[in-house]
Image (spheres, coloured by chain):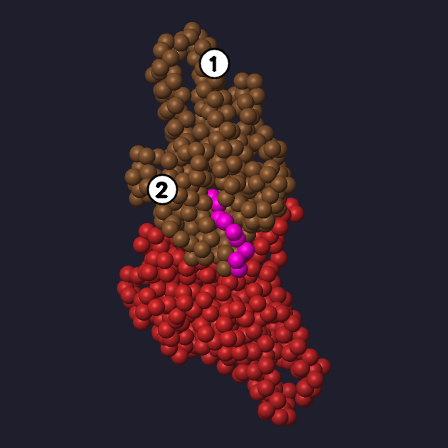
Chain colours: A red, B brown
Amino acid sequence: MKVQALERVGNRLRLLDQTVLPHQVVYKDLDDYREIIVSIKRLEVRGAPAIGIAAAYALAIGVQQDTSHQRDYPMDQLSALADEIRRARPTAVNLFWAIDRVMDRIRQAGELSKSSLVDMLWGEAEAIHEEDRRMCRQIGENGAALIADGDTLLTHCNTGALATGGIGTALGVIYVCRDQGKRIKVFADETRPLLQGARLTAWELMQEGIDVTVNCDNMAGTLLQQGRINHVIVGADRIAANGDTANKIGTYPLAVLARAHGVPFYVAAPSTTFDLSIATGKDIVIEERGGNEITEVFGTRVAPEGVNVFAPAFDVTPTELVSAYITDTGVRPGGRTD
Amino acid sequence: MKVQALERVGNRLRLLDQTVLPHQVVYKDLDDYREIIVSIKRLEVRGAPAIGIAAAYALAIGVQQDTSHQRDYPMDQLSALADEIRRARPTAVNLFWAIDRVMDRIRQAGELSKSSLVDMLWGEAEAIHEEDRRMCRQIGENGAALIADGDTLLTHCNTGALATGGIGTALGVIYVCRDQGKRIKVFADETRPLLQGARLTAWELMQEGIDVTVNCDNMAGTLLQQGRINHVIVGADRIAANGDTANKIGTYPLAVLARAHGVPFYVAAPSTTFDLSIATGKDIVIEERGGNEITEVFGTRVAPEGVNVFAPAFDVTPTELVSAYITDTGVRPGGRTD
């Protein structure tokens, strides 16, 4: 893989700045945890798994850079640092999860010298990163078994190396297909309003030598109608106990169209994305975002001043429209019965 | 109505340049038919009926401006001019229809002096314009009977005063509802790639005092899922004999979603949009446009250099997904049976 969203380099974190893609390829080597927080806030690093990994590295770097304590490091100071990192994104479940996991491990370890603490924090961050890498690879391998040589896939948003610590989820399936020698074509929905498909998925797949074509979200119906798509494959932000899936806005219409054309619709996600505390999609609250993401495209105003805007960040696809869930622990059937 | 796309002013055609809306309101007074062709090509004037009217005016202006013939005007030169105008847009059936209608009338008239020819061409263009105005009003009245006070409508692209010589087709229905005192709410798909919904429909409806909300095309599924839409109403570029409907890309997915949610899907169009020479939608050739409409948004590049792009301008909605056709001659049932 040529594309990597983030990487430990010595005692620094190297981040690929995704806000300037695809125009510029800029890596940032960060040795200040506050810079990592800014990168998370600015969406220079994005994708739930990648944010969690970046947060864990930020905690290690935050303690490492603090010269006010040489021998030991006060627990309340570590907690304050963890809280500061937690506030970088208010709704990023993986961010909280990663910080909580590291903090639990430190608390279990008991008293530590500062240098042992720093080693342990780096080690935990690397472990989280490595587990994500492995999970992506397993999702990819489980999903690749469903895809044949010569197939064409349609995907939405960005669920690849740019969004995770490894090869991605939905795009991970495509990379494993490539590694297995299957010739795969991909159509990438541009994914309004933030155009992650056009800006990130297209760039990432081109870097990796995969045949990719960008289309507007509203053109997917024509692709399916023309019989050009063998599988639709997307990621997931959150999956309810019954399988209803919250994902980037625009996923639900794809699922309806896929069923109308008898084309399989797959959700590729780590098994940790299943949230058993949520019974069905009805219990998922849909975040509405600022309307200016729609009315302005990279600084150009495209709608009249003062117009009302409807801007949900994600939608919920009922399990009846999902052919299968591709996870690291295997392929589970969805509620779609055709 | 405050909004008007085009108007004869003396011996010129006044066009509202729709490429700079909603930022600027710029009218162009054109006395060169080549400028009108450029305006049609650049989508400064757009919408099938408005293009037909502009084409008829272009023919009058083209002969009027030609100083190489004073007394009479050779028929083969008129035919060449007509062909040049016909080529402005390959899929605009109204353009061909308007030009053919004028040419038939001229042929029937027999030999004419140049000044009589010019008068006749202007007269025919104005007659086409006036008929379109009347047709829009009739479509509006026929459609308004289907809409109740308090209803919320979802529409796509722009099918209003900006697209026609009158109050529009799908939006004409909304204007007549307003004139009848019905309180109507409208959701407008932004309509990628050229954003006619965000730029034009939102602007036009705001000018006319109608409650409008803009959403990305991929958010329409959520609106339908949430039960917030009573009717989906769109225009048409071309309707085959069996009712299959070519319209702006993104219409077909709306029709699939509307059926999935049991929400009526209406096509509002002049009866002249039915092209009986085309048996079904399979015979409609889909125009593909330049990929840069997708990869660049008002000059900002949003996809990698060199990426493949799929950019159909239209899609075809089978009649099985259409609840009814709202035309100037009445409401005809579609092929949808629920």
Per the model, the C-alpha gap separating discs 1 and 2 is: 38 Å
**Magenta stretch: residue B146 in it?**
no
**Which image quarter is the N terminus of chain B in?**
top right
Left or right: A68, with A169 as reference point:
right
Q: Nearer the viewer, mark 1 or mark 2?
A: 2
Q: Residue at x 32, y 51 (%)?
A: A226
Q: Residue at x 64, y 78 (%)?
A: A82
Q: Circle 2 sits in a helix, a strand or a loop, which is it? A: loop
Q: Is residue A186 shown to the viewer in this render? A: no
* Residue A308 against residue A2 in the figure, above or below: above
| Disc 1: CA contacts within 10 A as few (<14), some (14-19) or many (>=20) | some
Instruction: Please name the residue that numbered disc 1 is placed on.
Output: B119
Q: Position of residue A151 (x, y in %)?
A: 30, 61
Q: Which mark is residue B243?
A: 2
Q: Looking at the picture, which amino acid does disc 1 mark?
A: Asp
Residue that sits furthest to the right in the current view: A68
* Residue A256 against residue A49 in the figure, above or below: above
Please provide the residue range marked out in magenta. B226-234
**Magenta stretch: residue B229 in it?**
yes
Q: Looking at the picture, which amino acid does disc 2 mark?
A: Gly
Q: Circle 1 sits in a helix, a strand or a loop, which is it? A: helix
Left or right: B130, with B23 as reference point:
left
Q: Position of residue A117 (x, y in %)?
A: 61, 86
Q: Chain of mark 1?
A: B
Residue that sits furthest to the bottom in the current view: A110
